[in-house]
């Protein structure tokens, strides 16, 4: 028996595969890796990080298994329904930052069931 075939799957690889399967249940969604700058897109993802810049903005980073996108809301300190690990549907115009980050500013949003609920 070849023991190399029994190696466990990397957790990040398994999670990305789970997220891609979850995303495929939403036919009108663009994978984050496929969004284009200066174009409107609708994406879904699991909230990976939440950052608050007091008096300035609230940012969340979402991942869908193909990539990550940062959503930023200017002047917000809280948005009901946003929580780490939760699912989120975002719609807005995409910008690519100088460091390559994909970003939406003040997108419309709807909390959705995440893949592990």
Image (cartoon, helix red, strand yellow):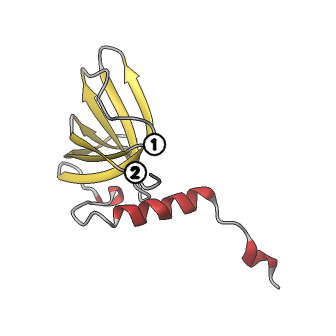
Badge 2 vs badge 1, beta-carbon distance below 8 Å: yes
| 43 left or right, relative to 116 | left
Identify the element where label 2 is drawn.
loop
Report, in whole angstroms, how far the alpha carbon at label 2 lies from the one at label 1.
8 Å
Q: Is residue 28 above or below residue 86?
A: below
Residue 92: x %, y % from top left: 19, 45
Residue denoted by label 1: 85
Question: Foreground residue, 40 or 21?
Answer: 21
Residue 103 numbered mark, or none: none
The single residue placed furthest to the bottom in the displayed view is 1
Query: In the rendered view, does 109 fall on the left or right side of 50?
Result: left
| Image x and y of residue 37, in percent | 23, 50
Residue visible at 25% across and 46% down?
90
- Residue drawn at 53 percent across, 58 percent down: 15
What is the x, y in percent for residue 66? 41, 59
Instruction: Tell me: residue 114, above or below residue 59.
Output: below
Say what secondary structure mark 1 lies in. loop
Q: Quadrant of residue 54?
A: top left
Residue sitting nearer the eye, 65 or 22? 22
Q: Which residue is mark 2?
A: 114
Q: Residues within 10 Å of mark 2 (few under 14, many from 20)?
A: some
Residue ID at (21%, 53%): 41
Query: In this view of the protein, which residue sits in the foreground, 35 or 45?
Result: 45
């Amino acid at each position: 028996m070849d023991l190399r075939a029994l190696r466990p799957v990397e957790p990040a690889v398994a999670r990305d595969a789970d997220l891609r399967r979850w995303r495929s249940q939403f036919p009108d969604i663009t994978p984050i890796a496929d969004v284009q700058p200066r174009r409107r897109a609708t994406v879904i993802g699991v909230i990976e990080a939440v950052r608050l810049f007091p008096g300035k903005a609230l940012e969340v980073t979402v991942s869908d298994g193909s990539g990550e996108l940062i959503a930023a809301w200017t002047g917000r300190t809280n948005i009901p329904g946003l929580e780490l690990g939760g699912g989120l549907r975002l719609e807005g115009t995409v910008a690519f930052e100088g460091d390559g980050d994909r970003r939406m500013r003040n997108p419309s949003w709807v909390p959705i069931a995440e893949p592990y609920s």
